[in-house]
Image (tube, rainbow, N blue to C red):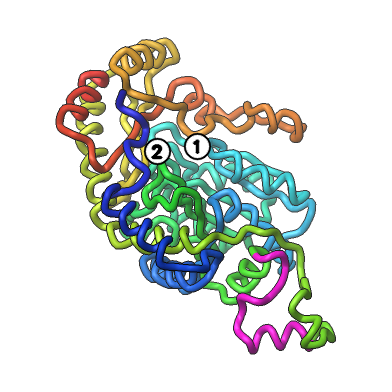
Amino acid sequence: MIPLMKSTFYKEEETRKKLSDFVLDNQYLSMGEQCFKFEEKFAESQERKYATLFNSGGSANLALLQSLKNLGILKSGDQVGFSAVTWSTNVMPIIQLGMKPIPIDIQPNTLNTMSNQLEKMLSTTKLSAFFITNALGFCGDLPKIKKICLENGIVFLEDNCESLGTENYAGLAGSFGTASTFSFYVAHHLSTIEGGMVCTDSESLSDMLKIVRSNGWTRNLSAKKQDHYSSLNNISQFQEKYAFYDLGYNFKPTEITGFLGITQLSYLREIVAARAKSYKFFNSVIQKNGDFIPTSSGELTTISCFANPVVCTCPEVRREYLKAFSLSGVETRPIIAGNMQRQPFYLKYVEDTSKLMGANFVHDCGFYFGNCPDYTQEELEIIKGCLE
């Protein structure tokens, strides 16, 4: 069996030993110094001013939209665009928070929403925000999309959970939006077992994210900001310990999350380089096979995908390749969740659906297999044989 993920961590044995020592040596493991240190280092690595750590990537998405509502930037009833091929937790918070999800089609050879598709949507529909998904190591023409959003007063958000380290001529994926989210689930680039992050350059959004993360209280803000909130609301020093200033959740990570994040972050360059090399190897095989629609790198200078996408020419061809992969013991999955409009929860809670040719094509004809940074040569050859 060649699974989607071969290990829990990059440099598995070394990381597990460090983790064991850390747990044995530290009495308190609730959110603290390690988490804050990881936030600081991750923000620096992403060239953003602020980073807020959460207990999962899904929590990060929900907290981001809740924070924007708390600040009055978004409100109930707002129309929020999203990439039609995405993960459930990009769309569910839009519905849960009383906003209207607007799916925007994707381009099969990039797996992503492009600027022309956003412009087409805006010709008929007004959006308050656009939550794009940088899918499977690829992304749309983000500088153009950012410009369109700025010109139209649209809050631009990025889900970069699958493309950590991907870069184009203008910067890192995840550095273009007002905020961007990341996942540290075990199958992703950096594993903290479970974990997520939101990055932003906005101080007020960063503060609100910390409030939302911790039940609605301010204890993770500076003393000056805590005093500001308590004075503004006429809260006494005694009562302030349990004062809740806005809508929030308990999305706090543990010190284990922070420690693992710091440890894995030190290997990020190696991880990205290994994943980019693996993708390049498999893509060279895909490019030569007429059964596949090759992915287009466009303006990307680095492609860092947590899994390798394959888009077949038709559903019948996909069926044959899925069979070949299965017989060779290579684990596969659909491309993310396919066309989100075809998911049961979406059909239950959203009345309107639209015809999205690109998303439907990827839903019916696409799949992915793993992109482990430590494949053996034998494993590479097995997967290559499946693609051939």
Are the residues tagged 2 and 1 within 8 Å (C-beta)?
yes
What segment carries the magenta color?
214-231
Residue 166, disc:
none
Q: Residue at x 32, y 50 (%)?
A: 299
Location of residue 201 in the rendering, given as x and y in whole percent from the top left corner: 51, 72
Give percent across and percent down for residue 55. Answer: 55, 55
Q: Is label 2 in a helix, a strand or a loop?
A: loop
Quarter of the image where the N terminus is located: top left
Going 37% across and 56% down the picture, which residue do you hit?
20
Q: Please tell me which residue lies in front, 178 or 271.
A: 271
Please tell me whether mark 1 sits on a helix, a strand or a loop.
Answer: loop
Residue reaching furthest right? Answer: 234
What residue is at 37 percent from the left and 57 percent from the top?
19
Q: Does residue 140 appear left or right of residue 14 in this picture?
A: right
Place of residue 202 in the rendered image (x, y in percent of width and height, measured from the top left)? 56, 73
The answer for how far apart the CA atoms under marks 2 and 1 are is 8 Å
The percent position of residue 90, horizontal first and vertical second, equals: 59, 45
Q: Which residue is mark 2?
A: 110
Instruction: Give, as a three-letter code, the residue at label 1.
Output: Ile
Work out whether 250 lies above or below 117: below
Q: Nearer the viewer, residue 338 or 83?
A: 338
Residue 252 located within the stretch drawn in magenta: no
What residue appears at the point 50 percent right and 49 percent down from the top-left corner? 194
Disc 1 target residue? 106
Kindly identify the amino acid type of the residue bearing the numbered disc 2: Thr
**Rendered position, 342 above or below 113:** above
Query: Is the residue 172 above or below the residue 340 in the image?
Result: below
Sort mark 1 into few (<14), some (14-19) or many (20+) by Cα contacts within 10 Å. Answer: many
Judge from the rendering whether residue 77 lies leftward or rightward of residue 118; answer left or right.
right
- Nearer the observer, 11 or 161: 11
